[in-house]
Amino acid sequence: MRFKNLTVLLFVISVLLFITAFYANNIKLEKTASKTNTIQEPDSLSKNSGGQKVYGVVKTEKEWRESLSDEEYYILREKGTERAGTGKYYRNHEEGMYFCAACGNELFGSDEKYDSGSGWPSFYAPKSEKDINVIKDVSFGMERTEIVCSRCGSHLGHVFNDGPKPTGLRYCVNSASLVFKKKTNKSKTTNNKE
Ligand code: FE
């Protein structure tokens, strides 16, 4: 009889130990899960809604370095600025279109280009506002508005409020961010017909 009681007691203790171990393991799993969620959530949020736009043209830094010259990479991808008055398009007065040097997006036309005297190619408007994204820039102790290509996110320059009519804006753009294509005689004829 006594032996039987001892067996029952051992059985009950075993069951209790099993139940305790089961719940303890569950609690541990829950803690791991909540910890994992806490880490993952901010990461996914910073990619989607942390101010970083997902662009249509996406390349790795290695691919950008391979597709651009050193100067273009510095200006377009590292937000650099060419020295005033040195850019190849600063004094370009030919008729044609200016495209993004990184992705080929059509950005500015010669019709909107004007001589601002700033040392950089200046336009009072882009060809289409949808091709340009504006970003608040507080670097170098100044508050400026950076302009980037809306298709690839590459740095173009800045936009200021001291431009001529009709917009009053000055899109100040690095020559290295642009590729100019001259208007052909055929399109000249087409555009100038009366
Ligand atoms: Fe671009």
Image: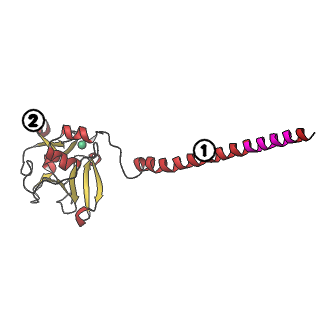
Does the magenta run of residues contain 10? yes
Instruction: Find disc 2 in the rendering and name its residue.
Output: 184
Q: What amino acid is labelled 1 in the image?
A: Leu
Residue 138 higher or lower than 109, as above or below: below
Q: What amino acid is labelled 2 in the image?
A: Thr
Task: Find residue 165 and report its image quarter.
Answer: bottom left
Quadrant, the N terminus: top right
Sequence order check, earlier mark of 1 and 2: 1
The magenta stretch is 6-17
Does the magenta run of residues contain 19? no
For this rendering, which residue is in front, 70 or 88? 70
Instruction: Find disc 1 in the rendering and name its residue.
Output: 29
Report the side of 69 relative to 141 (left or right): left
For this rendering, which residue is in front, 182 or 11? 11
- Ligand 1 in which quarter: top left
Q: For the residue labelled by badge 1, is the local secondary structure a helix, a strand or a loop?
A: helix
Q: Which residue lies furthest to the top in this view?
A: 186
Report the side of 96 relative to 16 (left or right): left
